[in-house]
Every structure is written in structure tokens, then in C-alpha cells.
Image (spheres, rainbow, N blue to C red):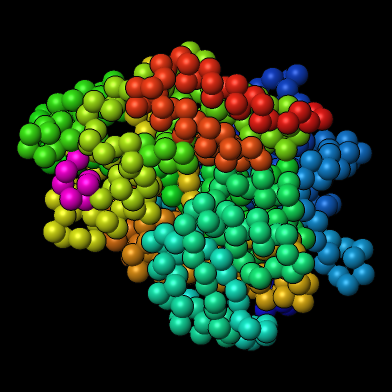
């Protein structure tokens, strides 16, 4: 297995899928030809030309040398060489030795370039379709998403056994969250033990206990765990505290096929430009709604907060045991997440992040210089929205958290519920549930002037920074197995409703298990899946807790909305430490 490290072999794809994969690259290349031919002053853009050539060669499985890439630039050699060095310095291109001497090397797109290409290609194609029409009628073309770097038309094969069993004392030790997806992994323990050739010892905790154990483990001289699950908002804190090892210190990240991960989930695993974990669950929070109840009432699926409030009001009928909506409103962590996501629904993050196309930029968070943005007019809109939502919620709403909000939905007691996709098995696999086969999936309805988003949640699996060096190679191999496309498909077929990979969602067998995968892929394709609503700064857990306390007092009628916002802002300001920018 180690002999394969650093190698990256594209999967086999059908001719139709391959054509679609290269479509946008060819369009940009030909469009550049037309511009340069039409206007004398339009000179070739060497950065773009080299990037297009490198990506096209990567997708076609061709090896590219520096000389070949310079030739593709269409500018003089000296200029092209300087531009190539700039791209290397910017982390867009990786060099890999082709010989033992290291004097000859090949060039490959970095995960940064692949990630940026994923977003650009989707936007280019969407803009072209919106402006000129001509949407694909070919089924295979529709099913292909550019986020999947090699999105297979062929089914994902079963989980393979490693060529050599892992040799590690006491087996692989894993710390995870006690949610349905990780419990599926536990149920498949024997199968995974056969795959890696060594026992697996898994410990599962609730979310707050998991974070506490992760921090305690970092204080030990040597880690008790080979692999730990980390909630996405914790990435910055765990990276700054040295809890996690940067992945590039332990492995060749190309082995993971980064472009196959949903863009938001993969980016959320980074801090300061480095990956600290591999997405094991990418589970956006959606609005679940009863299609049958909406149809009976003559209601359209709500895309705005106003429409959702109207639907909640019209479907709310406490005398018959039916309420409009359930959501996270329990004091502390649960409600804190709701506050951050609700502000995002109205178009504002909880920090003063720079606005970019499609959302807000989180790339520079490791440099510091950010501040909380809670006591704002948008914050007030979010607060007033939650107060109105209370009117159409169950009477025990202020004690509802992660599972409690979905259980009444599954039981037919609420018409809508906010919930992560990982909770869908509560009603998707229970034929006695009134929501079985009657659930629609939507991104969060948006406030005035804002866009719909699906806030990304979930977990990455990372390697503790204090893991004994002799255990790191085995941890890397196990990590690759646990997060592989083959493993992710296995989780889905055994009940999971989370999936971080495009290729898994493209698998026909996976798609048949639940409409949720088509819905989530469509949201990713439309750039609706975003992780900026919970920016992974070191202070985020405390900010969430603060919002969950102050807004809970507001919802209980103890504190007016403006006072709750002001107090939350004051506490958050005191929390954020000044840093060098």
C-alpha cells in the first residue's frame, strides 16, 4: 500500500461522462482562442492557459512535464517560466519526482486548484445555460456533477481488503460522535476489520463530550486514539491548539481524490490553507416538509422565510395535535446553531467575513482580524423571525435539540422541521411514519434580499498531533479506507443519509436508497451548500454557546430582542482575542 502513496490513477469513466467532464475546459480554451484572434490587443493569459492544459491532462490521465506546460502558455519561454513559478508559489501546482534522483518531475493540479476549478466550472456552465438555454437532455450528462472529479457512470465496487493487513499494536483506535452514521460504521465493524486486517476499537460520545475528550486527549503525552472525529466548526480551534496533525505531514493528500468531495465539506476541513481532516460526513441542514400536507393545503414548497411562516401558520393546528414546525431551540449549543444559521438565512454571517461571489470568504480566518456581527439590523430580523416561529412550534420547543426536533416530524406531529440529512432515517426507513415517502427536501428558506443556502454540518476524521510516530502510517491507511468512496457507499446502503463524495451520490444503487442524495447534489451544484454560517474560528463554540443562552432568554420572554443582541455582541467581543493580521 505504501508503494502506491503519491500515485493517483483516474477511475475509468464512460465516454459520455468523460466528454461532459472536459466540456467546460474545452469551452474556456476555445473561447480564449476566439478572443485572442478577434482583438489585436488581447494577449494570451499564460496563467489561464497553463491551468486549463494542466487540468485537461489531469482528467485524461496524461503526465505533464514543465516543458509541456510552458509550451501550452503561448507566451515566450522566460515569461511562461516566471508564471509557472508564480503558480507553484501560489500552491496551484504540485511537483512530483519522476526519478529517484529527483532531477525530473511531473506537474499536477493541487487540491487548491481542483477545488477552485470545481466552483468555476459549475458557475460557467450554469451561466451559459441561463443565458443561452440548451440544458442537457442526455441522462448521463444531467447526472454528472463537475464536483466529482471522475464521477463514475459505473457503480462503486464493494469495499476491498488491503493487500497487507495493518500491523499496529492493539488495533486501530477511533473516537467518534454517537450519531446514526458513525453507529452504522460500528455495526459494520467486522467488515472493516477484515478490510484493514486488524481490530477496530471505537468509542462514541455526545457532541459536547466528544469535544471535551478530544481536548483532553491532546494534553496527554501520547494520544489514546489513532483517528478522531471532529465537528466542522472545531477545525480552527483544534488546529490552533495543536490537537490535530496537518494531513500533509502524514500523507500525500492526492490519495484522497480531493475534487471528489463536496466543495463546501472539503473546504471546511481546512485551516490556514491546510487540511486537518478528511470529510467523513457531509450533512447539510435542510428544511424537511410534508409534501402531502402542503398539497392538501394548496401550498407551494417555501423558498422564503415569509412563505415558510405562512405555511407554518396555516398548517399549525394544536387542537388536532399538529404544529407548524420544529427546530433547535434548547438552551446553549442547540439554539446557538439555530441563531447562526438563521442570521445566515437573512444574508449575514456571525463574523464580519468578506463577501465573495456565492457567499463569504473564510480563507483568511487563520490570520485573525475578524469581529462578531450579532447586534445588527440583520441580527434583529433573525431574532424577530425566531420569535414569530415560536407561535407555530410545539409547546416544548424550548427544550428541543438535534433529535427531538425530528422525532415529532417522523411521528406526524409537525408539518416541517429543520434537520440534518443524517436524521432522515427516522422517517425514511420507518414505513409506519406519516412522513415516510411524503418528505420533500429544501435548502433553508431565505430572508428578504438573501439567497437560499444549505448550511453544511458533519464531521471530518483526523489524526491526533500527539499520535505515536510509529502508529501514523497505519492510521493513514485506515483513514483512507474509512473515508473512501467504497466505504461511504457501504454506510449509505446500511442506513446512513450523509455522504461527502460526488461519486457516491452518482452511484445508481445509492441514489435508489433515498431522494435526499439527488436533492443534496443539486444544492451543491447550485452553490447552495455553504459552511460559512458557522465559521471554524477558535472562538466559535463559545460564540454559539453565548447566542444559545442570550436568545433563549429572549424566546422565554425574559429579555427584549434588542437587549439580547446587545448582550450577545458584548460577550462575543470580549471573547475574540486580537491577533496579528
Q: From the image, which quarter does the C terminus lie in?
A: top right
Horizontal and vertical percent for residue 415?
A: 19, 38
- The span picked out in magenta is 408-414
Q: Is residue 52 above or below residue 370?
A: below
Q: Residue at x 77, y 67 (%)?
A: 221
Q: Is residue 575 left or right of residue 263?
A: right
Q: Is residue 333 above or below residue 427?
A: above
Horizontal and vertical percent for residue 418?
A: 33, 40
Horizontal and vertical percent for residue 279?
A: 55, 56
Quarter location, residue 264: top right
Q: Is residue 410 magenta?
A: yes
Q: Residue furthest front?
A: 558
Q: Is residue 405 left or right of residue 57?
A: left
Quarter location, residue 166: bottom right
Q: From the image, which quarter does the N terminus lie in?
A: bottom right
Q: Residue at x 66, y 70 (%)?
A: 224
Horizontal and vertical percent for residue 514?
A: 29, 56
Residue 449 visible to an observer of this rendering: no
Considering depth in this image, is 329 or 292 the residue closer to the camera? 329
Considering depth in this image, is 513 or 371 the residue closer to the camera? 371
Q: Is residue 313 left or right of residue 568?
A: left
Q: Is residue 522 left or right of residue 64?
A: left
Amino acid at each position: 500500500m505504501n508503494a502506491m502513496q503519491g500515485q493517483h490513477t483516474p477511475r475509468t469513466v464512460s465516454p459520455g461522462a468523460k466528454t461532459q467532464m472536459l466540456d467546460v475546459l474545452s469551452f474556456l480554451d476555445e473561447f480564449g482562442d476566439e478572443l485572442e484572434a478577434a482583438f489585436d490587443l488581447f494577449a494570451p493569459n499564460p496563467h489561464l492557459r497553463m491551468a486549463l492544459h494542466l487540468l485537461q491532462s489531469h482528467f485524461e490521465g496524461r503526465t505533464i512535464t514543465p516543458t509541456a506546460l510552458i509550451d501550452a502558455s503561448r507566451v515566450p519561454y522566460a515569461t511562461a517560466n516566471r508564471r509557472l513559478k508564480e503558480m507553484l508559489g501560489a500552491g496551484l501546482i504540485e511537483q512530483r519526482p519522476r526519478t529517484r534522483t529527483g532531477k525530473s518531475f511531473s506537474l499536477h493540479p493541487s487540491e487548491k486548484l481542483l477545488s477552485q476549478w470545481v466552483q468555476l466550472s459549475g458557475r460557467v456552465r450554469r451561466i451559459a445555460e441561463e443565458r443561452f438555454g440548451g440544458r442537457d437532455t442526455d441522462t448521463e450528462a444531467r447526472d454528472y456533477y463537475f464536483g466529482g472529479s471522475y464521477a463514475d457512470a459505473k457503480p462503486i465496487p464493494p469495499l476491498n481488503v488491503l493487500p497487507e493487513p495493518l500491523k499496529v499494536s492493539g488495533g486501530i483506535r477511533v473516537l467518534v460522535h454517537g450519531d446514526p452514521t458513525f453507529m452504522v460504521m460500528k455495526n459494520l465493524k467486522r467488515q472493516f476489520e477484515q478490510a484493514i486486517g486488524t481490530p477496530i476499537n471505537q468509542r462514541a460520545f455526545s457532541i459536547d463530550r466528544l469535544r471535551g475528550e478530544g481536548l483532553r486527549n491532546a494534553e496527554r503525552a501520547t494520544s489514546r486514539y489513532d483517528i478522531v472525529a471532529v465537528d466542522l466548526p472545531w477545525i480552527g480551534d483544534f488546529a490552533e491548539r495543536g490537537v490535530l496533525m496537518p494531513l500533509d505531514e502524514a500523507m500525500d493528500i492526492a490519495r484522497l481524490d480531493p475534487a471528489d468531495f463536496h466543495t463546501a465539506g472539503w473546504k471546511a476541513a481546512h485551516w490556514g490553507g491546510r487540511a486537518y481532516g478528511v470529510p467523513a460526513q457531509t450533512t447539510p441542514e435542510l428544511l424537511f416538509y410534508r409534501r402531502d400536507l402542503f398539497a392538501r393545503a394548496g401550498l407551494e414548497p417555501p423558498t422564503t422565510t415569509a412563505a415558510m411562516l405562512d405555511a407554518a401558520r396555516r398548517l399549525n393546528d394544536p387542537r388536532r395535535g399538529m404544529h407548524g414546525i420544529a427546530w433547535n431551540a434548547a438552551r446553549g449549543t442547540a439554539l446557538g446553531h439555530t441563531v447562526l444559521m438563521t442570521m445566515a438565512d437573512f444574508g449575514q454571517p456571525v463574523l464580519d467575513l468578506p463577501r465573495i461571489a456565492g457567499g463569504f470568504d473564510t480563507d483568511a480566518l487563520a490570520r485573525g482580524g475578524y469581529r462578531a456581527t450579532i447586534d445588527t439590523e440583520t441580527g434583529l430580523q433573525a431574532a424577530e423571525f425566531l420569535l414569530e416561529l415560536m407561535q407555530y412550534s410545539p409547546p416544548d420547543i424550548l427544550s428541543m435539540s438535534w433529535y427531538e426536533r425530528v422525532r415529532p416530524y417522523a411521528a406526524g406531529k409537525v408539518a416541517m422541521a429543520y434537520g440534518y440529512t443524517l436524521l432522515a432515517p427516522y422517517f425514511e426507513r420507518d414505513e409506519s411514519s406519516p412522513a415516510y415517502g411524503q418528505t420533500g427536501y429544501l435548502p433553508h428558506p431565505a430572508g428578504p434580499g438573501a439567497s437560499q443556502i444549505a448550511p453544511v454540518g458533519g464531521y471530518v476524521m483526523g489524526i491526533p498531533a500527539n499520535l505515536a510516530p510509529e502508529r501514523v502510517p497505519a492510521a493513514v491507511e485506515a483513514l483512507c479506507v474509512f473515508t473512501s468512496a467504497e466505504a461511504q457507499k457501504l454506510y449509505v446502503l446500511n442506513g446512513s443519509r450523509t455522504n461527502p463524495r460526488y461519486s457516491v451520490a452518482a452511484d445508481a444503487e445509492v441514489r435508489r436508497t433515498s431522494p435526499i442524495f439527488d436533492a443534496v447534489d443539486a444544492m451543491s451544484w447550485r452553490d447552495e451548500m455553504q459552511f460559512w454560517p458557522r465559521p471554524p474560528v477558535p472562538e466559535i463554540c463559545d460564540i454559539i454557546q453565548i447566542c444559545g443562552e442570550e436568545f433563549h432568554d429572549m424566546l422565554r420572554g425574559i429579555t427584549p430582542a434588542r437587549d439580547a443582541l446587545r448582550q450577545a455582541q458584548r460577550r462575543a467581543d470580549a471573547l475574540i482575542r486580537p491577533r496579528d493580521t
